[in-house]
Amino acid sequence: MQKYSNSFILVAALGLASCNTQQPQQQIAVQEPAARARLVSDPNFKLPEGTGCGGTVNRFRAIIDNDLETGHTTKSTHFQMSAEIDRASSICANGNDGAARSMISGTRAKFGYPAG
């Protein structure tokens, strides 16, 4: 019977020892943002002034740039909006004020910005 008890103790000890061996832990890569968003606008932030489609384009561009800086929009959304603003800016520069303002209004509505 002593032999059975020693064997049992040996098996139990080996079993417990295997529980305590360190298993390689899987490393999870976490990407840190290049710069942390401020979450609030800079106290000196002011919308550009100006009239006509040029003012409209510049103000909306400032708003989305600020939203990117403060973490209220993503880079991909900012990229999409910027492309649409660039097209409106080009149309504005070609003298079509109404079409440029209409494009900005459409972009604002599409991305959930109130009319401005």
Image (tube, rainbow, N blue to C red):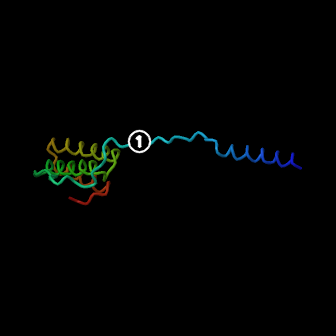
Residue lying farthest to the left in this orientation = 50
- Left or right: residue 76 versus residue 114 is right
**Residue 46 appears left or right of 5:** left
Residue 75 drawn at (x, y percent):
33, 45
- Residue occupying the point 86% across, 48% down: 2
Q: Is residue 1 left or right of residue 74?
A: right
Residue 5, image x, y percentages: 83, 49
Point out residue 7 in the picture as x, y percentages from the top left corner.
Answer: 82, 45
Residue furthest toward the right?
A: 1
- Crowding around mark 1 (Cα neighbors within 10 Å: few <14, some 14 to 19, many 20+) is few
Give x and y (percent) for residue 56: 17, 51
Q: Which type of secondary structure does the marked residue at label 1 adopt?
A: loop
Q: Which residue is mark 1?
A: 31
Q: Quadrant of the C terminus?
A: bottom left
Q: Is residue 42 above or below residue 10?
A: below
Residue drawn where x is 17% and y is 48% of the image: 58
Quick one: which residue is furthest to the front in this view? 2
Question: For this rendering, which residue is in front, 43 or 84?
Answer: 43
Q: Nearer the viewer, residue 113 or 100?
A: 113
Callout count: 1
Q: Nearer the viewer, residue 55 or 74?
A: 74
- Type of the residue with mark 1: Gln
Q: Is residue 25 left or right of residue 5?
A: left
